[in-house]
Image (cartoon, grey):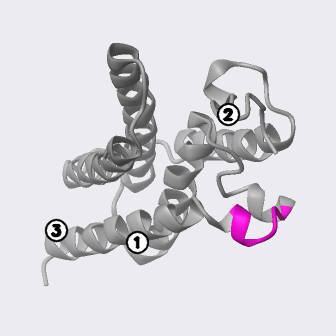
Amino acid sequence: MTKKSSILKFEIISTIFIMVVGTLLHFTFGWSNNNSLIGTFSAVNESIWEHLKLLFFPMLISTIIGYFYKGKVIPNYLCSKVIGIILSMSFVVIFFYTYTGIIGTNFAIVDIGSFFIAVALGQYVAYQKMKSQSSCNKLVPIIVLLVLYLSFVVFTFFPPHIALLKDPITGMFGI
């Protein structure tokens, strides 16, 4: 198996993993009887911010596994994966606010579809970037991942009161 085909195979498996785990993370907080620890990586309300956890945490897990599987031999692995994560999260936010701004409401089926598109888009772009074999400083993507991780955890308990973090159903913020 060539290096590119093994990377592609891993990225396809990762895409499926992210879609399945991300979908399950929508429910795990409720399933856990609103356990605060589970809430740090699961959606605790219906805000866009909380739904970004459904992308970020499975993508983070996939990135870490992939780093030990293939990332050490791909010079831009971490940069590629972080670009994919940021692109996926940006797509969800931009798509949601654009389509709900145009039609005035949201539809669960469209939101779910945009989640799957965001995952596929982020994974595809990360794969294409990895194939370029450009190098990158590993410190920058590590810092970005840490900042995102800490933001999700801290904002679960101490959310800034901005629209991105507001539950449209209850009007509440965070847990």
Q: Are marks 3 and 2 in contact (CB under 8 Å)?
A: no
Query: Relative to 56, is 90 above or below?
Result: above
Locate the N terminus and report the quarter of the image it occupies: bottom left
Choose the circle earlier in sequence order: 3 or 2.
Answer: 3
Q: Are marks 3 and 1 in contact (CB under 8 Å)?
A: no
**The stretch drawn in magenta includes residue 34:** yes
Residue 139: image location, x then y, percent = 58, 44
Q: Secondary structure at mark 1?
A: helix
Residue 38: image location, x then y, percent = 76, 64
- Seen at 72% across and 64% down, the residue is 30
Read off the residue under disc 1: 17
50 lies left or right of 132: right
Read off the residue under disc 3: 4
84 lies left or right of 5: right
Choose the circle earlier in sequence order: 3 or 1.
Answer: 3
Q: Amino acid at mark 1?
A: Phe
The circle drawn on residue 167 is 2
Q: Secondary structure at mark 2?
A: loop
Q: Which residues are magenta?
A: 29-35
Query: Relative to 121, is 60 above or below?
Result: below
- Seen at 48% across and 58% down, the residue is 59
38 lies left or right of 74: right
